[in-house]
Image (cartoon, rainbow, N blue to C red):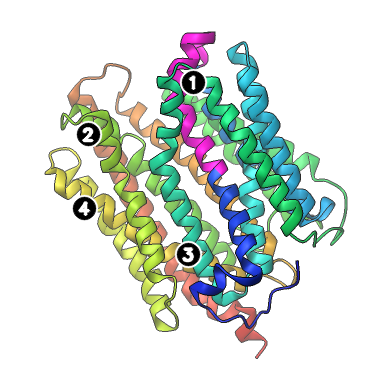
Amino acid sequence: MTSIDPNEQPTWRAVFSGRLLLPTLVINWGILLFAIDTFIITTIMPSVIQDIGGTSLYAWPVMIFTVGAIVGSASAGPIRIKYGQRDGFVLAGLLFLFGNLGAAFASTIEILIAWRLLQGLGGGLIISQSFGVVGSIYPPGLRTRIFSVISTTWGLATVFGPAFGGVFAELGSWRSAFWALVPLTLIFCILVWRFIENQGKGEGVQRFPVTRLILFSAGILTIGFTSQTDESINRVLLILIAICLVAWAMRRDALSVNRMFPRKTLIPTSAIGSSYWYNLFFTCMFIFALIYSTLYLQILHSKSPIVAAYISANLSFCWTAAALICASWSGVMIRVAVVGGGLLMVAGSIGLYLFALEGPISFIVLSFGLMGLGIGFSNIHVMALTIECAEHGDDALVASSIQTIRNMGLAFGSAFAGLLANSAGLKEEASPVVILRAIELIHIGAIVLSILTLMSLIIFIGYHGKENRFTRNQ
């Protein structure tokens, strides 16, 4: 594949034609595979347990996939350096493929969990490598458009992913859900091999960051164990241990030559650092907003499971719509999208606090929508602007590691939300009074996170102008 002209006109046609057509297809194919695999497991798990048992380990296939995805996405930078962009991408696809093959043959829940770990590793690598390709071959003017297309792909997976698994569950063949992904993954690997250039190989030290990945894995796995205990003190200790392990890994990474993350990661007084804090905070925020939404919509508002799911999914629908609307904005409108998006998130989180418990339902739907619009308006522009602040040669690393930060937000957000709910007394068969108390506390947490998200966006806008390498070099 020939190189992409950096002066490519920023139009939708440019994303879906010429030299970018096939990379756009490959990237979104990979995103769709990961997203579907993320959503189908919750749909087929009752059938899995009925077939091979393992009720006591019910949450582990989901948890271990998340652990693998975070470790896989964190490995994207070193994998790209060691094997190159194309070969690293193919490796990710093969890990994902064999993970699905193994899961389809699993005879016990323990074997399924092991193969789900491999699925997560491959899936995390796929999604981070996809973001890395955006950073390496798409010119700055087209990045918001391709990011909005990726958001659309995620939105489609949100709608059809559970249904994909549900079809096979209804047919009584949960294994077929994994089998169905095998040919799709094989096609993905062929497309990557044929149409993605193998650039980036050998750009730096070849030594693989084994110690850092072990520390990182241990930290994320520790977070996963928070869902296995009902004691608040145990959850607090596990979260603190996880934070220490992840912080240790990232500290070692900052001092290394073959980095998994760019310089200034999580340093709030920098463009990249504030951007990464934004990604961490907003991911935690929407996890807080969604994690117990179907519970209170069913119990407190007497909605059916499918209706409750689609009320919550309004956040994803509006996220996708906003990303498509603002993808072509430029100049001062970018600042409007970024800061305005932050304000919409604050408004949405306040709306959920006010209306989640007593309604009306229309205001709950509106609040989810405001939050989704806020994420959609701000997210694609922050990602594109963050890549502009990367040091020379770090575009792919900055783009791919954004997904790692988000995955961390998913893990830590779920753990903290569970801690708050547990402290309010939320357990199985909890009374409506306990549910009211837990949901109120969680939505207070969401408001705090939305304010932190807005603050990160304001700081990011201030530092982007100073650190944008395109304006800095003029």
Query: Which amino acid, by three-letter code, is at mark 4?
Result: Leu
Residue underneath mark 4: 366
Instruction: Look at the numbered discs 2 and 4 and tell me whether their residues touch, using CB distance below 8 Å.
Output: no
Asked whether residue 262 appears in the rendered view, the answer is: no
Instruction: Please tell me whether mark 3 or mark 1 is closer to you in this view.
Output: 3
Q: Picture quarter containing residue 424?
A: top left
Which of pointers 2 and 1 lies earlier in the amino acid sequence?
Answer: 1
Query: Which amino acid, by three-letter code, is at mark 2?
Result: Leu
Q: Quadrant of the C terminus?
A: bottom right
At a point 30% along the width and 36% down the height, the residue shown is: 309
**Mark 2 nearby-residue class (10 Å; few <14, some 14–19, many ≥20):** many
Query: Which amino acid, by three-letter code, is at mark 1?
Result: Gln
Residue underneath mark 3: 380
Q: Picture quarter containing residue 338?
A: bottom left
Query: Which amino acid, by three-letter code, is at mark 3?
Result: Ile
Residue underneath mark 2: 297
Residue underneath mark 1: 228
Q: Is the stretch drawn in magenta largely helix, strand or loop?
A: helix
Highlighted magenta segment, given as a residue range: 33-57
Question: SS for tag 1?
Answer: helix
Which of pointers 2 and 3 lies earlier in the amino acid sequence?
Answer: 2
In the shown orientation, is residue 52 left or right of residue 210? left
Residue 399, numbered label: none
How far apart marks 3 and 4 lie (CA) works out to 22 Å
Question: Is 50 a magenta residue?
Answer: yes
Question: SS for tag 4?
Answer: helix
Which of pointers 2 and 4 lies earlier in the amino acid sequence?
Answer: 2
